[in-house]
Amino acid sequence: MLKEFYPYEYARNVFAIDYKKLAQMGYTGLIFDVDNTLVHHGDDSTPKVDSFFAWLHKLGFKTILLSDNEKSRVERFNKNIRTQYICDAGKPDPKGFLKAVELLGEPKDKVVCIGDQIVTDIKGANNAGLASILVHFIRLPGEKHIGKRRYIEYFVMWTWKHRRKYRHRLGDILRSGK
């Protein structure tokens, strides 16, 4: 029952993933959540995130942002990145994920979804038949409140860690030393 919430892999953040290895494995498309995955909730993109996307595109990846945020928020974030996006996605409904795959123009088995929420990003990607990577959500220093849903996620991840067949389904895709 919990398997629909299990990510293929878990990474500390988006920068801890070895994208060169993903490319070597044949992955060509990346779907990213925005808030608490790439930046803290509501923040604009940063120069680090902007250059990260430029580097991903140089590696040959096609990227798309998939967000439940409204258009003005996603456009503001995407100002310097200039990638495709879908706003008001209705996650975890698989329709938004499948639309993202269609816009990428890549087969589902060549696309990875990366997000910070099990209930929306991971469940939606898994139900759409996509590989998924959960990243730890971004918090501001000293931020204490995390919400009830995060405690549920801690429980799900505790069970995931004890179910070996669901762990590391993408292989060794974490950057060493990061």
Image (tube, rainbow, N blue to C red):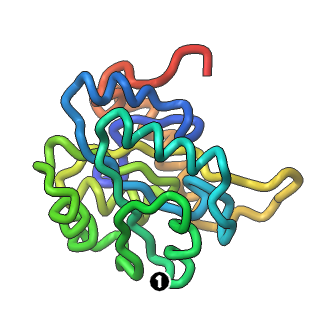
Q: Residue furthest right?
A: 142
- Along the line of sight, the residue nearer the viewer: 47 or 4: 47
Residue at 63% in and 67% down: 148
**167 sits to left or right of 98:** right
Q: Is residue 31 above or below residue 120?
A: above
| Neighbours of disc 1 within 10 Å: few (<14), some (14-19), many (20+) | some
Q: Quadrant of residue 64?
A: bottom left
- Split into 4 quadrants, where in the image is the N terminus? bottom left
Q: Quadrant of residue 98?
A: bottom left
Residue 152 at x, y percent in the picture = 54, 58
Q: Is residue 13 above or below residue 39?
A: above
- Split into 4 quadrants, where in the image is the C terminus? top right
Residue 75 at x, y percent in the picture = 50, 75
**105 sits to left or right of 68:** left
Residue at 56% in and 43% down: 51
Residue at 39% in and 30% down: 19
Residue 176 at x, y percent in the picture = 53, 15
Q: Is residue 4 above or below residue 58?
A: below
Task: Name the amino acid, label 1.
Answer: Lys
Residue denoted by label 1: 71
